[in-house]
Amino acid sequence: MTEITFQSVLEALLDPKKDISYAHLSFYSDLDPKSLRLFLDAWKNLPSKRKTQLLDYLTAYMDEDTIVSYEEIGRAVLDDLDAEVRARALGLLAESDDPRLVNTLLGVLQADSDLAPRLKAVNLLGEFILLGELEELDEKRLHKIEEALLAVIRSDENPALRRAAVEAFGYSGREDAVGILESAYEREDPQWIASALRAMGRSHDSRWGDSVVSKLLDPDPRVRYAAAEAAGELTVEEAAPILLKMLEDEEEDDNVTMAAIWALSQIGGEDARAYILSLLDNAEDEETAEFLEDALDNLDLNEQLNRFDMMSLDEDDELGEFDEDEE
């Protein structure tokens, strides 16, 4: 067999008669400066369709192989003339926690002329807000992100961009977030309600439990989907019987069904386990069975974490009693 080199990978990329090979995808990872220059020389000669195809393949490969990193490529092609290419390039940066990326993302949000890259930038900025809440991002950068998202939310920008900003702002612990989420939730537009519910789930704030539960049986599947996701993120135990009822409805939307199953795996309980096992026993295809097995694994993990938390609380109580005895 002919040895694969990066040069041969680029030659294949430039050949429109050849499909992009799965075996070549790892060669684009962690490019050194010389390889990146060679890549960009080839990139200039690619049509937009080939560019987006490669970026889609790389993004999918990142989900399969957690070791690869395409940050060098993502950063290098952010100035491409095609908006869809720029948006996909941002997708290659989704795993990055480099604080220097914040200014790049803010630049895209505030200066890019197309919606697709701006939407992607907003989504990634939400992840950096989460890092800030976990004290893994400095307060100055966190504040810049929050102010930029607030400006979008309060503007007359594209509604899809404003909704995305609401969802991203859900990670924020600022008091502003409560009013923003309430305002979006109270709108009549199902898309705004769904965005508010996603933000509620991201907040991990139990105050939203009742609001989430009240939308689980909403007539609009987009709202039900977001409510199911949020119920799982918030581990709302009161949602479990309603989620089970949703799953018994044979006419339920497939996406809503999957969201409800995953939410049950997050909430836990014997009824949830029994139902997921019964679904697994009757799974008709490999993809469904794999998803249900993942849900069971997630349920096991969450129950283990809950037991660990309970043990920690018991130990704290015992230490407290010991301290009182000492006094």
Image: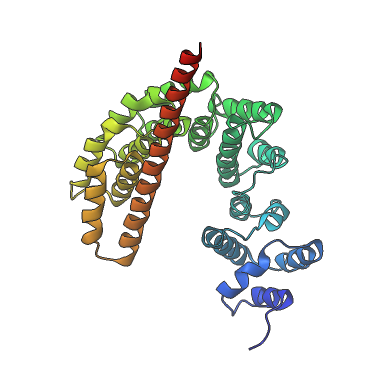
Image-based side of 271 in relation to 53, left or right? left
Q: Nearer the viewer, residue 129 or 159?
A: 129
Residue 105 is situated, as x and y percent measured from the top left of the image, at 66, 41
Residue 36 is situated, as x and y percent measured from the top left of the image, at 76, 63
User: Which image quadrant: the N terminus?
Assistant: bottom right
As drawn, the residue found furthest toward the front would be 326
Image-based side of 229 in relation to 94, left or right? left
Count of numbered labels shown in the rendering: 0
Up the image or down, 276 lies above or below 185; here it is: below
As drawn, the residue found furthest toward the top would be 327
Give the residue displayed 31% in from the left and 41% down from the top: 268
Up the image or down, 239 lies above or below 180; here it is: below
Residue 20 is situated, as x and y percent measured from the top left of the image, at 58, 73
Which of the 4 image quarters holds residue 156?
A: top right
Which of the 4 image quarters holds residue 200?
A: top left
Give the residue displayed 68% in from the left and 54% down from the top: 71
Residue 227 is situated, as x and y percent measured from the top left of the image, at 34, 36
Q: Nearer the viewer, residue 316 or 21?
A: 316
Q: Nearer the viewer, residue 8 or 322?
A: 322
Q: Nearer the viewer, residue 203 or 166?
A: 203
The answer to whether one can see residue 21 in this image is no
The answer to whether one can see residue 42 in this image is yes
